[in-house]
Amino acid sequence: MKRFHIEVPVPVQFMIQELEKYGHEAYMAGGCVRDCILGRKPHGYDICTSATPDEILQAFPNKEIIPDGLQHGTVTILINKEPFKITTYRMEGGDSDYSRPDYVIFTKNLDEDLRSRDFTMNAMAYHPETGLIDPFNGMEDIKNKKIRCPGSAEDSFHKDALRILRAIRFEAQLDFTGAPDTISGISRQYEKLKNISMERINSEFCKIVSSDKFCAILDLYPYVFSVFIPELKDMTGFQQNHPYHAYDVFSHTVHAIEKCESDDFAVRLAVFFHDIGKPHSYQDGEDGIRHFKRHGKVSAEITDTIMKRLWFDSEIRNHVTELVYYHDAAFEAGKKYVKRWLNKIGEKQFRRLLEVRKADIKGQKPDYEKSRIEKIDHIKSILEEILQHQESFSVKDLAVNGNDVKKIMNLNEGKDIGYWLNEISKRVLAGELKNSRDDLIYWMTGITDGCEIAGK
């Protein structure tokens, strides 16, 4: 059989050679090998070795070292400012607390190290001279697009339940499917995710949300996601009973995610969360139609709670909750309306909001889609026109500034200057004033002469 060849980066070759000079085994291993086989660019390169952490440090006395991970047998070495991880061969030991293997046992055996890894496609190693080491047929599983554990999936997931989310993430990212044993292990062990730290869950969840297969994965594994987002259970089977909707709330969300054209992470999260408050904010009319007044507000509040629980930072959390809050607001086509949105949330968020709205519409009943999407597209064209002509939609875009207002209107206090800048901006947005320096100065002079300032 022809030997599989991987072009090993020079720094990786260097580290393998240096470890071997000291009498240790060393191989490129794990996800970087998998990615090379798949023709994907690895996000980083990992090396496994028979050397202990102390021996690794001795082999690189003149290199910059990042000490994080030493207790788990990992040494990170910087070469030309790029990090490379070198990890001692290890095998799992003892019972796990389901949040992280409670300890590792170092070994001198490469096969034992590979056996302890999550999936066969990650349980391969490569050496520039001896080639691919694949004791668990990871290459065959990659060829067949199968996610399989080196041993029993149930045992593997019991040792570290995060592997359940990792399996699902690889399905989403690589378009693989779980082997029967893997699927069975997920269905039997998924509740152990309750004991996994939210920080670790967040990392895998974000990668799933960012993948093209997020909608399919959500549809396949709602029970898994419900372990750390139990609010999803209320959406499942909750009928909307509305002319615009063809699906229950959960199925509508899945369809909206499927139709989302944006790869912006905030947009994708907002589409996922946008209707999560509907089961808690509905009224059934006498005509049998179900109404969801102010469900955007309720959904935003629930979203904020969930994102705090999942350890999202405040910046992304604020962006997403704002999009969820406004996703069902009135969108009117007209410059003054678009400028108001720009003034309220800014260009980037407004663009995101339109993408969320489009996905929401496309996840509803197709009968009403065409005209509503055309309206969103028209609003986008108005937005582009405003930006192209650099028209004013906020105080910073005005043709006058605070010093002009202070001088012309004879003001001293900063709050009075701010008040009148906002007044001018509102009138420009409403089309009552033209955003030209001469016109605005003329208007301020007239206000001053008319003594209207005191009565503001």
Image (spheres, rainbow, N blue to C red):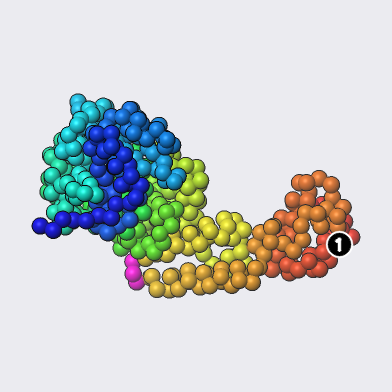
For this rendering, which residue is in front, 123 or 46? 46
Look at label 1 and name its amino acid: Thr
Residue 200, image x, y percentages: 34, 38
Residue 85 in picture, x, y percent from top left: 34, 40
Taking depth in this image into account, of 346 and 277 the one nearest to the observer is 346
Residue 354, placed above or below residue 194:
below
Disc 1 packing (10 Å; few <14; some 14–19; many ≥20): some
Quadrant for residue 73, please give it: top left
| Magenta run includes residue 365 | yes
Res 241 seen here: no
53 with respect to 451 (left or right): left
Q: Residue at x 26, y 27 (%)?
A: 103
Q: Main secondary structure of the magenta part?
A: loop
The correct choice, above or below, for 101 with respect to 223 in the image is above
Q: Residue at position x 28%, y 49% from top?
A: 32
Is 396 or 14 nearer to us in this picture? 14
Which residue position is annotated with label 1?
445
Is residue 281 rendered magenta in the image?
no
Q: Which residues are magenta?
A: 363-367
Horizontal side of 407 relative to 396 (left or right) equals right
Provide the secondary structure element on which disc 1 rests.
helix
Residue 334 left/right relative to 307: right
Residue 244 against residue 281 in the figure, above or below = below
Residue at the far right in the pictured view? 449
